[in-house]
Image (cartoon, rainbow, N blue to C red):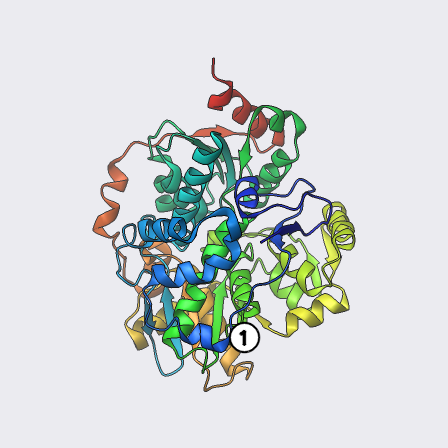
Amino acid sequence: MEYVSTRGSAPVLDFEGVTLAGLASDGGLYLPREWPSFTEHQIREMRGLAYWEVAVEVMTPFVGDSLTRSELIDICQQVYCGEFSHAAVTPLVQMDETHWLLELFHGPTLAFKDVALQLLGRLFETFLERRGQNLTIVGATSGDTGSAAINAVAGRERSEIFMLHPAGRVSEVQRRQMTTVRAPNVHNLAIEGNFDDAQRHVKRMFGDGEVNSVLNLGAVNSINWARLMAQVVYYFYAALQLGAPDRKVAFSVPTGNFGDVFAGYVAARMGLPVERLIVATNVNDILHRALANGDYSAGDLVPTATPSMDIQVSSNFERLLFDVGGREGAAMAAQMRGFDKDRAMRLTNAQREGAAALFVSQRADGEQMARAMQWACENAGQVIDPHTAIGLSAARDALAADLIDPATPIVTLATAHAAKFPDAVERAIGVRPALPQRVGDLFGREEKFASISGDYEAARSFVLDHASANAG
């Protein structure tokens, strides 16, 4: 399996190469040169398999020669048979005759990021040991990526992680899950500004020649293909339980950076019968505007009760635009240069039409989010987090607007445990969700993080000064 950059001029890499590289050297994102596909018979053969077994089948075409089948089986068993509190890993819960929840929060940090990052941590370890190399991971988080990535690599010998989060713009649980980890290879940075600022610094660091001359940088954000690949698995797993390939399924995905919903697009390209992918946004609705009328323009970011979606520049959207727009790397590079300059661009007709074949979008504000939480509690006995509520609101609105066939089951991705956002949940339904016992004494642990200004040089200097590759 060969991987190419969305911007056309970076080297072609294999799976091991893209896993360790993260962002392409030309600033683009890696994708498979061609999409692997399954026949209906092959999908049907996956019915009844355990989660780890589905993971092996779905990921095998992507890893190519970088892992033997026995190596992939061993990694998947380590991750999905030991790190999650539910035997099904990502169980489905029925809410009514149409709506289902796909619970993605049974990992160690109570968010969907665990499903991919627990795997990514082991892939890093395998490939770095093979090469005899060390990796300096630099990431940005709007809340959940940071804790999941830190948990996946804390204490590992060949990886060191620097995680940037926007100061005061993540929930207390999200922050503490990052800042109370005391492993020597973990560095937390609270930066002035928002997630988009943090994400911009990380991308810039990957293109900084001086940084790359002394550090071997790696990425854990969804710009890393391996992380996104692992998320494809739960679309297959859920659809199989609902009758695939003999029955189509729709998915509603609360998203800000577009990685989670793009994984659903990949599943569809691989042959999974996906009726629709509903892109659910909060009031920071750049993705809704782009899909609804072709307007991909960054506005002023509004802090909300769904901080993981408070994003105005959605990195993974570039992957979709490249794939549906003709896979022209030079044209994609020029389009993104224009966006970087003007913070706005229009989608081409090919991009709009290609996206519309599978995607619809819905926007939900704080009131709509609260109503969805109330409906889930009163009608289905489910206490859901604010991000999941955005997805559920979008699912119900899409059904009401006749965008989805009423006979098609709609699966809303439950991306985080409600206890990660107790204040917002309590305001909406009058119930304060408790943290699961497996989280332990989170509020009794000492926090440690560095506070830095919001400019790139501050982040760059911190990483260079504190990276173990420069120690001594």
Residue at the (34%, 62%) spot, across then down:
51
Question: Are there few (<14), some (14-19), or many (20+) residues within 10 Å of tag 1?
Answer: many
Quadrant of the rendering where the N terminus is positioned: bottom right
- The reply to whether residue 172 is visible in this rendering is yes
Q: Left or right? Give the position of 47 relative to 31.
A: left
Under mark 1, the amino acid is Arg
Which percent across, then down, holds residue 183? 34, 30
Which percent across, then down, holds residue 128? 46, 35
Which percent across, then down, holds residue 468? 46, 22
| Residue toward you, 207 or 142 | 207
| Residue toward you, 262 or 38 | 38
Quarter of the image for residue 414 reads bottom left
Residue located beneath label 1 in the image: 276
Which percent across, then down, holds residue 189? 47, 32
Residue at the (65%, 73%) spot, across then down:
356
Name above or below for residue 63 compared with residue 200.
below
Q: Left or right? Give the position of 440 relative to 453.
A: left
| Residue toward you, 265 or 399 | 265
- The reply to whether residue 171 is visible in this rendering is no
Name above or below for residue 288 compared with residue 132.
below
